[in-house]
Image: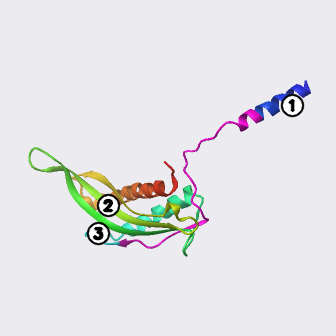
Amino acid sequence: MRNFLIILVVLLVSACAGIPSYSFRGGEIPGETFSIESFSNSASIVNPNLSISLQDAMQKRFTNESNLKYTDGIGDAHFIGMITKYTITPVQGTGSETVALNRLTISFKITYANSVSGEQDFDKTFTSYDDFESTEDFNSKEEDLVESISEKLVALVYNQVLVDW
């Protein structure tokens, strides 16, 4: 009986070892550290908190979800960013020539360089937006909109760098 259990365990372990594993978490960036240079802002409308919001969101995302550790110096993975667009545009009109929805659109250009492996380096502009009711006061909604759009933009950058789709 004991031999039977040993054989059963060995067969079970060897069978499980042959099962491929899949991960939807993403890949790994070569290196051990990442750094983010202060984002500049060349948009025609400047939100003074946007650069900090984007940098904080990127640092949080890459720290929590990648294999890298943040460094104040130049990391193995290095990001340089510039906010290029911050606009509010009408999206949906009504029959009475008034606007029902407005859209806040933010674009930023990221230059990514990896000193360990330059295969994934890129220089790309990412854009995202959120809509809001035209009857709402933009100044009271702006912080929430910026936070939401920042998270979307960081997800786009993260996916570009890490996920091999």
Residue at the front extreme of this rendering: 119
Of the two numbered discs 1 and 3 in the rendering, the one whose residue sits closer to the viewer: 1
Q: In which quarter of the image is residue 6?
A: top right
Numbered label attached to residue 19: none
Q: SS for tag 3?
A: loop
Residue drawn at (29%, 70%) of the image: 46
Can you tell which mark lies on residue 6? 1
Dominant secondary structure, magenta = loop
Q: Residue furthest right?
A: 2
User: How dense is the environment of label 1, judged by Cα within 10 Å: few (below 14), some, or many (20 and up)?
Assistant: few
The image shows residue 43 at horizontal and vertical percentages of 29, 69
Dot 3 alpha-carbon crowd within 10 angstroms: few under 14, some 14 to 19, many 20 or more: some
Specify whether 12 is left or right of 25.
right
Q: Tell me which segment is drawn in magenta.
A: 14-40
The residue type indicated by label 1 comes to Ile
Which residue bears the numbered disc 2?
106
As for residue 33 lying within the magenta part, the answer is yes
Cα gap from disc 3 to disc 2, whole angstroms: 9 Å
Image quadrant assignment for residue 107: bottom left
The residue type indicated by label 2 comes to Ile
Residue at image position (76%, 35%) is 14
Q: Do the residues labelled 3 and 2 touch (CB within 8 Å)?
A: yes
Amino acid on which disc 3 is placed? Ala
Q: The N terminus lies in which quarter of the figure?
A: top right
Q: In this figure, which residue is indicated by the disc labeled 3?
A: 43
